[in-house]
Amino acid sequence: MYKYIAKYFLLNKVYSFVSKTAFPSLVIGLIGFVAATYYVLFVLPADAEQQEIYRILFIHVPSAILSELIYLFLAVNGFIFLVWRTKASAIFLNSAISIGLVYTAIVLISGSIWGKPTWGTYWVWDARITSTFILFIQYVGLLALRSSFSSIQTTDQIISIVSIIGAVNIPIIKFSVNWWNTLHQNASITASGSAIDAEMILGLPFMLVALLFISYNIFARNIQYEILNRTGKTSMIREVING
Amino acid sequence: MDSIETVIMTFFLSIFFVLVLCLSSYIRYRNKLQNCQEDFDD
């Protein structure tokens, strides 16, 4: 299994793959984002209670899903790196941190803008919002740690350990609205059904997929940078760069 | 505060953040690639 993973993720193959797929994914993502934005802003009807402001949820919810999934991705790659020492996992981990940070910032800002007319305040220290703010601090901390050590090997080990420990916050964010009495509402979409109208709910996966494609472009560029930073002077990467 | 303009501004702000990260990641990679190529040429 280990040999299969190590062989499959040979860095020159990873570099070639992300080089070819980065730009097309950005184009698809931007077209998708414009189409999804048009759909949720101008095609969907206004909500009976919240009027126009409910449309912010179409950027807030996908960003929240991405911010949490990216952190889980960091923890999984941190674990793989610590157990099997695969360079690719350390590179994936380093490449995804900044993306998670931006989506967490978007969640907090869009949630505040939505909260003012709906709850009457930009911010409350309830369990969901506080745990999401802690996630934001975790991302900032990982970025700070990344530039705190001169040795790449030490950096990879430290951020792997920290990302695994920090993953405990993800179930806290997810279940905070069930465990505590919060101002933030419970999940609208559950295994037993959805509280959102079927026509309106379509905008969420549409926007999520568009953002995923754009995020892949950032991830790919970060992977390319990390590979060059670690192996830039070797003959292996020289062949890849020269095609 | 609860108008469509606020919603549009929020969408614009969000995609702006993402695209700034997109651009900065590309520039960082591009500069590194140039440095590597200069090293090879030397």
Image (spheres, coloured by chain):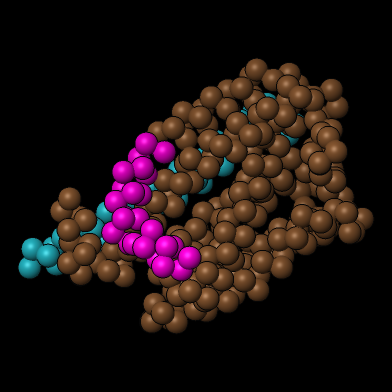
Chain colours: A brown, B cyan
Q: Do we see residue A141 in this rendering?
A: no
Whether residue A8 is in magenta: the answer is yes
- A151 sits to left or right of A232: right
A143 over A201 or under it: above or below? below
Quadrant for residue A10, please give it: bottom left
Q: Position of residue A193 (x, y in %)?
A: 83, 35
Residue displayed at 36% across by 63% down: A7
Q: Position of residue A21 (x, y in %)?
A: 36, 42
Residue furthest right as drawn? A181
Q: Which residues are magenta?
A: A1-26
Quadrant for residue A38, please give it: top right
What secondary structure do most residues of the magenta stretch adopt? helix
- A20 sits to left or right of B19: left
Q: How many numbered markers are drawn? A: 0
- A127 sits to left or right of A90: right
Q: Position of residue B4 (x, y in %)?
A: 68, 26
Residue displayed at 31% across by 70% down: A230
The answer to which of A159 and A124 lies nearer the viewer is: A159
Quadrant for residue B5, please give it: top right
Residue displayed at 46% across by 46% down: A216
Whether residue A74 is in magenta: the answer is no
- A14 sits to left or right of A106: left
